[in-house]
Amino acid sequence: MPQNESVILRHVFCKGSILPEYLQTTKDKEKERGFSVLKKVLKRILISIPVLIGVVLAIFIMLRIVPGNPVTTMMGEHVNPAVIEKVSKEMGLDQPYYFQFIKYVANALRGDFGTSYRLNRNVTQIIVEAFPHTVKLSVLAAVVAWIIGLTAGVIAAIRQNKLLDRLFMGCALMGVSMPVFMTALVLQYVFAFKLKWFPVSGFDSLNAMVLPAIVLGWNSAGSIARMTRSNLVEIMQNDFIRTARAKGLRESGVIIGHALKNAMLPVVTMMALQISSMLSGAVLTESVFGVPGIGRLAVNAIETRDMPLLQGTVIFTTVLIIIGNLVADLLYNVLDPRIREGE
Amino acid sequence: MSESIVLDIRNLKSHFFTAKGEVPAVDGVSIQVPAGKIIGIVGESGCGKSMTAMSVMGLLRYPGKVVDGTITLDGRDITHLSPKELSTVRGNELSMIFQEPMTSLNPVITVGRQVREAILLHQKVSRDEAKKRVIEIFREVGIPEPEKRYNSYPHQLSGGLRQRVMIGMAMVCKPKVMIADEPTTALDVTIEAQILRLMKKLCREQGTSIILITHNMGVVAETCDYVYVMYAGKVMEQAETFALFENTSHPYTQGLLKSIPKLNEKAERLYTIEGVVPNLLHLPEGCNFCTRCTEADARCRKEKPALYQAGDGHGVRCFKYESEVQLDGK
C-alpha cells in the first residue's frame, strides 16, 4: 500500500517515530531524542560540504589571481626561464586551472593535500605537527578568557553601576576593541622586555606560553565579561530569582545556583562560535610570539606563495570553524532543556 | 481573636524612594495571623497587598525599603535580620507562593531538584532522603506520577501543575506561615478551585497559617477566616469573613462587593467605584478614599480617620464608625 508507506515514511522523517505520541513510552521518547540529535548532526555535516567546496574553490581562485609566481619566489628572480618552465611543468602549474582544481580536490579527498613547495614535505604532515601548538595556545587562551571574563562579568553584574562595574566594563571594552597585535606588542614590551618576567618569544616552556595565552584570550575575555554581565543583570530580574530568594537561598547561592546557569547559555554558545576569531587571532599571536602553530604556518605560506600549504591550512581551519559551530549548536541543545525538547 | 498569634505585623511602613519622591506603598499596616488560620488581604491593584507580603519576606529590593514597624514571627522580631539570619527563616518558617507559576520556576532546573533544594537548605538530610520527601510532597499536593515528574522541567508542566510544585516547595519545610500572593490569578477557574481546596487542606493538616492575597472577593468568601481590605497602602476594613460580608461597613468595601455582578439581578451597566486609585505621591489630605467616596464630607477631606472598632474584631477606617476604641493602636 503506497499510501500507507508514505505516511510511515513521513512519520519517520518528520517526527522520527512511527508511533503517535500517546502510544510512546518514555524509552521511545528518549530514543527519539537521540535520533533527533543524530539527525541534526548529520544534517549539519551535509550542509557543510558545499561550504567546504566553496571555500576550497575561493582560495584556489584567489591564489591564482594574486600576482607572484611560486616558482620565481622559490628559486629567485634571476633564474633561467627555461628552468622555471621546467619546474612549473613538473609541479603541474602549466595545466589549465580547472584541471588543477579537480586534481587537487580528488587528491584532497584521499587525504593528500599536496607537497609544500618551500619545505618539500607532505602538507598534511606539516599541519598535524603544527596543530598541537595551536591547540595548546587556544586552550590556554580560552581558560584565560573564561576565568577573567566570567569573574569580571559576574562581579560587574552584582555591583551594577558601581565603580567596579564601570572599571571592569571599561577594561572589557578595551579588550574587545584593541587589536591582537597591539595588545601583543604592549605586553611584550612591558612584561618581557622591561620587567623580564617572561621570554619575548618562543613556546617551549609554560612560562613562555603565558603572554601568548593572555594576548589571545584577552579579546574573548572582554566579550565574555560583557555578555555575562548583561545576561546576568537581565536574568536577576526574573521571577524565579525571587522564588530562589524566598526559598532561603543566600544571594551567592541565588547567583551561582540559579542565575548563572541561565546566563551562561548564550555565553557558552558564543564561546564555541568564537573559535573562528580565536584562530584568526592565533595567526597574529603566533607570528608575534614565534609560536610554531597553524597560524604562523599560514603566514609563512602566504609570504612564500606556498600554495599547497596555504590551501591546506585554510581548509583545515574551515573544518575547525564548522565543527565549532556544530558544537555550539549541540551545546545549546544539551544545556537548555527547552530546546532539547522543543525539536 | 484569642488564638495564639504566629505572625504579628505592627504598623508596617514600606516606602519606595523614587526620583519623584517617597512613595508610601505600605502605610502603617497591622495584621495579626493566628495559628492555623487563613487570613485574606483584598484590594485593587497597587493598593500595597503584594508590597506588604514582600516586606514580610524581606524580599523588598532597592528602591523599596521597610522604614517603620515591626514584624514578629512566633515571638521573634524578624523586621531587620541579617542576610544570614533571614535565609534561615525564609522558605523554612515563612514561605511564599507567587502569582505567576509560569515564570516563578527556574526553566533550566528540574522541578524536583528545585523543591529538593529547599529541603537541603533547611534540614540536615541526605540527598536521597530529600528526594523521597519531594516525591512525598508531590503526591500530597496532587501531582500525578510524582516519581516521573521529579525529573520534569517546568516547561513540561501545565500552569496548574507548576503552581502545585510551588505550593509543594513552600510547604515542604512545614512553615508556620505561608504567604500566597494571588496564587490562582493566572490559572483557569476550575484549577483555581482545586488549588484553593488544596491550600485549605494543607493548612488544616499541617497547622500552617496562610496569608492569602487576592483581589477576588469570591475567593475570600470561600477560603478565608479573617479578612483585611486594603486601599492605597492602608487597611480600610478588617473583620471575620462572615462579619465582613454580613455587616459590610466601609464605603470602599461596600463598593467592592457591589461591583460583583450577580446572577439574579438584571443590570444594564455593572456597578463600578467611580474614579481611580489616587497617586501615592499625591495622596489626599484627609481619608485616602475620600476622592472616590460617595459619602465623604468636609471632615473626610481634612482629617485622616483611624481604624475604629465597629464590632468584635471588626475594624473600620471611616468616621461613620468613630468610637473610643481604635484597632491600629495609635
Image (cartoon, rainbow, N blue to C red):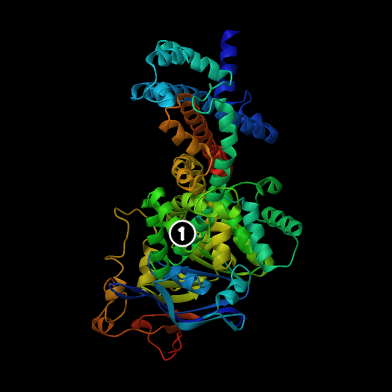
Question: From the viewer's perspective, is residue A147 above or below residue A124?
Answer: below
Horizontal placement of A116 versus B265: left or right? right
Q: Can you say which quadrant of the picture contains the N terminus of chain A? A: top right
Tell me the residue at 72%/55% (across/down): B131
Looking at the image, the residue that sits furthest to the left is: B298
Q: Identify the image quadrant of residue B138.
A: bottom right
- Picture mark count: 1
Image location of residue A12, percent across then percent down: 59, 21
Count residues near mark 1 (Cα–Cα under 10 Å), then give few for <14, some for 14-19, many for 20+: some
B141 versus B56 height, above or below: above
Give left or right: position of B174 versus A95.
Answer: right
Q: Is residue A333 visible?
A: yes
Q: Can see residue A42?
A: no
Residue B33 image position (x, y, % from top left): 56, 76
Give left or right: position of B13 versus A291: left
Q: Residue at x 58, y 55 (%)?
A: A207
Q: Which quadrant: the C terminus of chain A?
A: top right
Location of mark 1 (residue) = A193
